[in-house]
Image: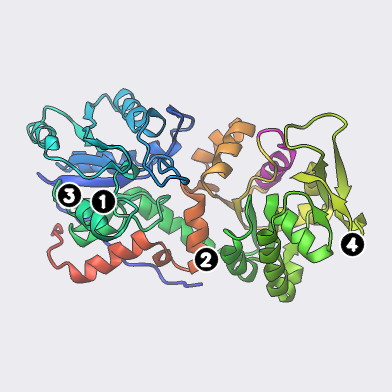
Amino acid sequence: MTKKNVAYPLLQEADLRGKTVLVRVDHNVVKKGLIHDPYRIDATLGTLYYINARGGRLILMTHVGRPKNKKTGHIEISDDTSVQPIVDYLQNKLHIHLEVPEFHRHPQDGYTGIETSINHLIRQLNEGKIDGIYLPNTRWFAGEESGGEASLRFANQLAGLADIFVNDAFGSWQAHTSTVGITDYLPSYAGFLLQKEIENLQRIYNPQPPFVAVVAGSKFDTKIASLFALVEKADALVLGGVIYNAYLCAKYGISIKGISPEDLESAKRFVSFANKFSDKIIELPYIVESDTMEGKIAGRYRTHNIRELAPGSQLNYVLDVASESFHDPSVKSIFMDARTIFVNAVMGYTPHFNDGTIALDSLTDQNLEAVKLYGGGDTMQELKRLLPGLYIAALDSPKYYIFTGGGAVLKAIEAGTPLGLEPVASLVNQRSTAGDIATTE
């Protein structure tokens, strides 16, 4: 992995006075119209305050959920994926007035573009009658993910709204129009959150050893590339979730219900690759088998010691790592001796199988010397749900850092550089070609 720092244009280099600033944030925290954790919103407030304090006028945009129906390919506009709860939260927290424009809805393609009806809001913004504009969910626009002419048109329309683009959406690492395409048309900068996330990635690229990485997930094939990188980089790698189940099947010739052929094949490739690093993979000895996925029902789940499972053993659903695994002296010593711990993991099947995750997070916290780096998404949500006191303490602790995007972290680990995230690469690339980026003296 690279040890070089990435040079990219920073928000603090931009001349913002009197400029309209289009800011891409990752405020994707709404589920069925409700905000369950505003962490990712709050993490961007420094950028928004700075832009306002330096005389910039704010236009915000984010994606929310997946409004495109996978079966029909149609974009479905609904309250469930609206930015309105985010707007309400910001208005109540900051005592500001934001407006959300509305456009004509195509029955299949969502919003086909930004219409001239937004001009009256732009005028109100310029005249100081409103404090900002929050665009509708970017994924409601046909040009956000489609590519081709629709994306080019959408990028041009976005650029027509502003003078400067700021990306502060670390978790939105996909190469979409609002994260990448826009940089072809406006001077573009990294916001303070994006800068902070990239800075903390360096603590994974260049960790203080011993470095322990914990990765879990519901599908092996989406994590395998980052696992290849981590098993080489880390001093110890711990697996959980379906990833661990598939690994056990591939290595020990057992069968676990629910493991897809694709995940098993990915696990076999990983086991073959990891043979030369076998001493690095820390196998958690105790797993929890359940007869049903409907809940943790008394009499219908049991704990197994993996060391006692014979080849050919057939198990029902394995839905957690038993907490005893993290009390095992060999496992506990690995965590207590570590100086850098990266956790992108929920060990059990939520919401009923929680013991493994609680034991993992509690053991990690017992190491007072290590830097603890947590991925975002489900890892962050489960830490807050299961150990709220630890979550609150971690937010203010210099020994913890919670990323806002777990998938983005794994993608960056896979690439070995933040430039593996296309939105970051697009900032760097436009800097070398766009000579008209305004900077302060």
Residue that mark 4 sits on: 311
Most frequent secondary structure within the magenta stretch: helix
Q: Is residue 345 magenta?
A: no
The residues tagged by marks 2 and 1 sit, at their Cα atoms, a distance apart of 25 Å
Q: Earlier in the sequence, mark 3 or mark 1?
A: 3
> The residue tagged with tag 2: helix, strand or loop?
helix
Residue 96: numbered disc: none
Q: Residues within 10 Å of mark 4 (few under 14, many from 20)?
A: few
The part of the chain drawn in magenta is: 351-364
Q: Residues within 10 Å of mark 1 (few under 14, many from 20)?
A: many
Give me the residue at 76% from left, 69% from top. Answer: 279
The answer to whether mark 2 and mark 4 are in CB contact below 8 A is: no
Residue that mark 3 sits on: 157
Q: Earlier in the sequence, mark 3 or mark 4?
A: 3
Residue that mark 1 sits on: 166
Residue that mark 2 sits on: 414
Q: Position of residue 128 (x, y in %)?
A: 10, 30
Which residue type carries mark 3? Answer: Gln
Q: Residues within 10 Å of mark 2 (few under 14, many from 20)?
A: many
Looking at the figure, which quarter contains the C terminus? bottom left
Q: Position of residue 216 (x, y in %)?
A: 64, 52
For the residue pair 230 and 15, the one nearer the viewer reads as 230
Q: Earlier in the sequence, mark 2 or mark 3?
A: 3
Does residue 75 appear left or right of residue 429 in this picture?
right
Number of on-image labels: 4
For the residue pair 159 and 194, the one nearer the viewer reads as 159
